Amino acid sequence: MKIPFNRAVIVGNEMEYIAQAIVNGHISGDGCFTKKIHNLLETSLGVRKALLTTSCTHALEMMAILLDIQPGDEVILPDFTFVSTVNAFVLRGARPVFIDVRPDTLNLDESQLEAAITPKTKAVILVHYAGVGCEMDDIMEIADCHGVPVVEDNAHGLFGKYKGQFLGTFGVLAAQSFHETKNFTSGEGGALLINDPQYIERAEIIREKGTNRARFFRGQVDKYTWVDIGSSYLPSDILAAFLFAQLEQREKIQNHRQQVWETYQAGLSTWAGERGVRLPIVPEYCDQAYHMYYLLLPDLSTRQRFLQHLRQQGILSVFHYLPLHLSEMGQKFGGEAGDCPVTERVSDQLVRLPFYNGLTGSEQEQILSAIMAFKF
Ligand SMILES: Cc1ncc(COP(=O)(O)O)c(C=O)c1O
């Protein structure tokens, strides 16, 4: 492909910091670069505790353990999301209750939330799709009223805000992704953000194979031992070194991504308006995270021809997500066609355009002219 969908690029001191981690002689988890990231996330977002993990999926798995999800418990989540949002909870025996998304932001439709809550509901899991905030005022009010904790799968939304407050700071817990396709990356990686301090101590234990090793290193216990369930959720400090260099450049990265997003939006608005193509909608009270740029084509066959057309021009665009309730697993939980009509429709229409930190102005011009040449 002349223009890939995503390409990982060096933005700052990645190579120097990796070399430094190796010279430091500490390349396992929780070395100095991991600690620098914890500190950066805690101070820049204002969260009580940040813990780097091996992926967002693993941060979500830690969440499910922390919330003490048991077989038969229900969790509510949007139908239009990545598999990990649901799988982490199903692994602990939860029954997923999928809610349709709003047709504008493609976030969980808060008007359907209250009716989905039952005495078995143990959590509401939100996804800030494309880094645009969910309707947090309404969602928090409904969840608080029923005493149900809210958690955020903020894989797309680092440094995005809803009404001036950072995404990832609303729920009791939030999960971040540093996968290669995200704004800031270590190839694979993630973080658990903890806003409710009651979860901090147990989170440290779960992340360290169920041991109280973190307390031992702080001198709070004189030996460390097996105290709970857990797994190995710490990334190597070599990965943290790479990621820290990326996070240090957050202003530069976010400015560039904003420019890419605005170039798409300005370049496509007339074209889209004349052809019934829907561009992203960002409410004025949301500062988005500039994670992705997507289009909604009129229907599935046009979408498939559009992807094929771009591919023939050497440009890789992709689609996602398939409705979870209609997946093989979703159907085992009773999902049927028609349950979530917005997700079913959007899933057929959506195209994600190439969007990465090294995307150049000339590459974007090529993408825009290839789009203009598409015959409806
Ligand atoms: C909404 C959402 N949640 C979770 C994930 C999983 O992230 P990771 O690959 O870091 O486990 C993704 C991946 O893209 C995602 O889009």
Image (cartoon, rainbow, N blue to C red):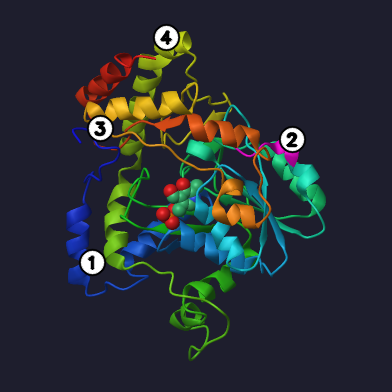
The mark lying in front, picked from 3 and 4, is 4
Confirm if mark 2 falls within 8 A of ligand 1. Answer: no
| Numbered-mark total | 4
365 left or right, relative to 165: left
Image location of residue 280, percent across then percent down: 49, 25
Residue at the location (21% across, 30% down)? 314
* Distance of label 3 from label 4 (alpha carbons): 23 Å
Image location of residue 50, percent across then percent down: 48, 59
Amino acid residing under circle 3: Leu
The magenta region covers: 106-112
333 left or right, relative to 371: right
91, above or below 17, in the image = below
The mark lying in front, picked from 4 and 1, is 4
Helix, strand or loop under label 3: loop
Task: State the residue in front, 46 or 244.
Answer: 244
Return the residue at label 1. Answer: 21
Task: State the residue in front, 136 or 119.
Answer: 119
235 left or right, relative to 15: right
Return the residue at label 3. Answer: 359
* Distance of label 4 from label 1 (alpha carbons): 50 Å
Return the residue at label 4. Answer: 270
Return the residue at label 2. Answer: 111
* Distance of label 2 from label 4 (alpha carbons): 32 Å
Looking at the figure, which quarter contains the N terminus? top left
Magenta stretch: includes residue 109: yes
**Badge 1: few (under 14), some or many (20 or more) residues near its Cα, within 10 Å?**
many
Amino acid residing under circle 1: Ala
Residue at the location (60% across, 69% down)? 65
> For residue 258, which quarter of the picture?
top left
Confirm if mark 3 falls within 8 A of ligand 1. Answer: no
> For residue 344, which quarter of the picture?
top right
Helix, strand or loop under label 4: helix
